[in-house]
Amino acid sequence: VSTVVTHLVHLPPSLVTEPAGVGILADLRIGGTGDDAGSPGASGPAEAELRRRLDDLAEIPAIDMLKIDVQGAEVMVFRGAREKLKRAVAVHAEVCFVHLYKDQPLFGEVDLELRSLGLIPHHLHHINRRTILPAFSAENPNSAMNQMLFADVIYVRDFTKANLMDDEQLKHLALVAHHCYCSHDLAIHCLYRLAARNAIAPNAVDLFAASLKAAVIPAN
C-alpha cells in the first residue's frame, strides 16, 4: 500500500464564478450574522456559473479525493464531475444545515448527490454553531449553543460494498483514511479486504496494527 501514488486534487475557486452579492442572509435570526455579513436576499449559488466542469479538465486525469468549499455551489460542481467522481474514494465538503445563501442546496441535497455516486458519510468535522436570536450577547457575537450552521463532512466510498471497489480504490481509501483523517479502523478494513483478495501480504493488518501501537506507545 505504501507504494501507491494518489492524485490529490485541489479545486481552485477560479473554476466557479463568484456568486453576485455573496453574503449571509441578514434575516437568518441567528447570532453573529449582522449587517457586515450580507443583506436580505443575498444571492448565492443559484447565480453562480461553472466556468469549466471537472469532467472536462484533461489535466486532471483522475480524482481519488476531492476537498471542496465553494460557498454553496458544491452540488453544481459534483454534477459537473460525475464521471471522475465515479472512482473517487473520498470527498471532503462544507455543507450547510440552514440557508446562508439564497437557493443554496442544504446538507440533504448534498448528501443525496454524493450517495448517488456511491459515497457515504464517514466523519462530521468542525461543526459551526450559533446562538438563536434573541438569546444573543453583543459582547460575544459568535457565541454558540446547539444550532448548527455548517460543517465539514467527509464522505468515503461505501466500504460495506467493497465488492464494487477494485484493489486500487481500496488501497487509496486506506491511504486517505489513515493519513488524512486518522481513521485507522477504516484503513484496517481496507487492508483486510485486500488481504482476502491476495492483493497484499496476508499479514498486512497485523503489521499495520503493530505500527500504530509503536507510534502511540514509546519504546522503553
Image (spheres, helix red, strand yellow):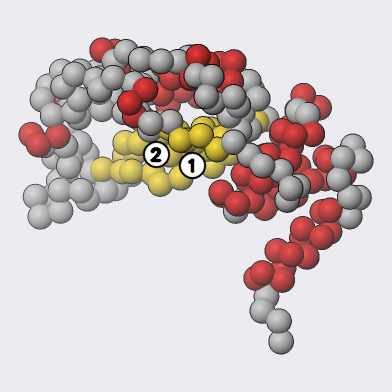
* Horizontal relation, residue 192 to residue 82: left or right: right
Quarter location, residue 168: top right
When the figure is inspected, residue 148 is found, relative to residue 24, above or below; the finding is below
Mark 1 or mark 2: which comes first in sequence? 1
Q: Which mark is residue 185?
A: none
Query: Percent from the top left, x then y, of residue 7?
Result: 59, 36
Secondary structure of residue under mark 2: strand
Q: Which mark is residue 151?
A: 2
Query: Percent from the top left, x then y, of residue 11?
Result: 43, 31
Name of the residue lying farthest toward the front:
59
Between 4 and 156, the one nearer to me in the picture: 4
Query: Percent from the top left, x then y, of residue 59?
Result: 52, 24
Circle 1: residue type: Leu
* Horizontal relation, residue 144 to residue 54: left or right: left
* Horizontal relation, residue 124 to residue 178: left or right: left
**Other-residue count near label 2 (Cα within 10 Å), few / some / many at <14 / 14–19 / ≥20:** some
When the figure is inspected, residue 149 is found, relative to residue 111, above or below; the finding is below
Name of the residue lying farthest toward the bottom:
220
Q: Which residue is mark 1?
A: 124
Tell me the quadrant of the picture where the C terminus can be found: bottom right
Circle 2: residue type: Ala
Quarter location, residue 99: top left
**In the rendered structure, are the residues bearing label 1 and label 2 in contact, judged by CB atoms less than 8 Å apart?**
yes
* Horizontal relation, residue 7 to residue 186: left or right: left
Query: Percent from the top left, x then y, of residue 213?
Result: 72, 68
Q: CA distance from mark 1 to mark 2?
A: 7 Å
Between 137 and 113, the one nearer to me in the picture: 113
Task: Note whether residue 121 is visible.
Answer: no
**Other-residue count near label 1 (Cα within 10 Å), few / some / many at <14 / 14–19 / ≥20:** few
Between 144 and 102, the one nearer to me in the picture: 102
